[in-house]
Image: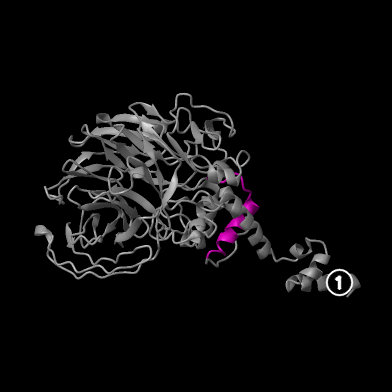
Amino acid sequence: MKQIKNKLLIGMVLLATACHATVNSNPVGSDTDKLFKLTSSKPDVGLTLPSGFNATVFAAGLGKARHITVTPSGYIYVKLANNKKGNTIVRLKDQNGDGVADEELDFGSFKGTGIKEKNGWLYASSDQEVYRFKLNNDGTVANPDQPEKIITGLIARGEHEPKAITLDNSGNIYVNIGAYSNSCQIEDRKVGSMGRKPCPILDSAAGIWQFKVDKLNQTYADGVRYATGLRNVVGLDWNTTTNTLFVMQHGRDQLHTIFPELYTDKQNAELPAECLYELHKGSNAGWPYIYYDQIQGKKILAPEYGGDGKKTAGEDAINPVYAFPGHLAPNGLLFYTGHLFPEKYRNGAFIAFHGSWNRAPEPQEGFYIAFVPFSKGKPSGNWEIFANGFSGGPKNTASGGALHRPCGLAEGPDGSIYVTDDVQGTIWRITYK
Amino acid sequence: MKIHHWVQFIFFICCFFQLPALSKAQDGNHCAVKKSPYRLSMDSGKKVYTLQCINCHQADGMGVPNANPPLKSKLVTGDKNKLIGIVIKGSATHEEINGITYYNVMPPNPGINDQEIADVLTYIRNSFGNKVSVVKVSEVKLVRIKLK
């Protein structure tokens, strides 16, 4: 299955200047069988960033590039939700240090979203399973055709089926199992259909499950439902300051569409919040019975369960540590631990907002990287847009017809960060001088 | 031709050539009265679309990548009975559309009547680059009887 390819890459894009990538002539260990000259390509969008930051196109044309991880040696692994000539994981490396990938190797036979390097292993998920690959000391994969299957049999029923993953420092892996429903209605997304109580989805989905990193073929019976009441999580990260798991929930859709007499189009666009939660074992975030209204600052009873947009509920549910406007679709979360960026960014949270669709007929929103500063494990300031312009302009943002949608985030050993896009498969590298 | 017929005819011409000053002199609905059944169905269909469909399928009918399918497809321009059935009963089959599967369900639509279903289907079959036959309310009623 393994296919070697020294890919022709792809010019650097800077905000103002475009440089030419140089020619790579370094073989990639024993894997390399062909060498190609590199070509450059013109940027199709310009990103705006705070002063002092630069964004370059590190690679392009990968397809549905979902999550991304970087080894200490600087190998970059990208998980694809599509087949790229039969392969589903892309390995990239910038061998000559010019800030642009100059070699590519593709492997893996399962489409998916999650990927994470930890302690010499590369973990990657399909929509039903989690695998791991042993890494060599240099960060290359030892046996690309023979991953170990560590988790199997996870529910994937269309809606919210990607299995995002992250790991702690104690030998555990955390897997999102998204709800195969919007709001646990008797009939999903049907106008006026009421919610099921108790919601039967919560037994096997709508939460984060904890498994062991090194045990083969674990099923639900081997795992722990670590946190529940989470509709769907794609962006999640282990915070090494607090030693806890943080997740970004995708809030429920279609308050107006399903309950037109209770909510306006405008409320439908803004509510509910996209929530950042800090989780502990046993945490319950309240889905589907409540949602968080960031304007009222309250947990509100869902209309499927008798709510009217004002009644509060969910006394047993945790509060978010931060609440963003609705439907921005947080697909990547990264706590920045590097030293390259200014001090303000240390230990703060970067969030990749994939961009909304469910604000229609109101304008769509998102398609950017946001930042929230943290101090002592808590948000210490307001959120701001860190990197914008992925959509290709305000018209594309408003219509939702974005050229690129930010999805995954990872930090490199030098403190730069990498951003994936799952429309065209562009990988950006963001640095600071 | 009697005089009031002439007056009506002049206002019709004004409407037809979009001469607002003169056409507005008549009551506001006068032009609408003269619209063809097709145009009336398209206008009504657009209203239904904006209320019931736009949130998932978007203003341009392009849908949402991976989530909600686009309406420029053979499913929309093909078998009317199947299309009518999907609007009435919804669909959770996640069948491939233009080679891609979409993860969201299409919910049933008990809140719109047969005329509105005919109108909205006429609208989507003649928008977003589609141009095929209209859907009549009688066709919707027949499908509804079969589904019972």
Q: Residue at x 43, y 58 (%)?
A: A389
Placement of A401 over or under A327, stated as above or below = below
Residue A158 rendering spot, x and y as whole percentages:
38, 45
In front: B134, or A270?
A270
Residue A348 rendering spot, x and y as whole percentages:
36, 41
Q: Which residue is mark 1?
A: B7
For residue A23, say whether it is visible: yes
User: On what subunit does the disc labeled 1 rest?
Assistant: B
Residue B32 rendering spot, x and y as whole percentages:
74, 63
Q: Identity of the amino acid at label 1?
A: Val
Placement of A341 over or under A104, stated as above or below = above
Placement of B101 over or under A250, stated as above or below = below
Residue A317 rendering spot, x and y as whole percentages:
44, 27
Q: Name the quadrant of the N terminus of chain B.
A: bottom right
Q: Name the quadrant of the C terminus of chain B.
A: top right
In front: B60, or A45?
A45
Residue farthest bottom in this picture: B1
Magenta range is B108-128
Left or right: A263, with A396 as reference point: right
Left or right: A147, with A45 as reference point: left
For residue A161, say whether it is visible: no
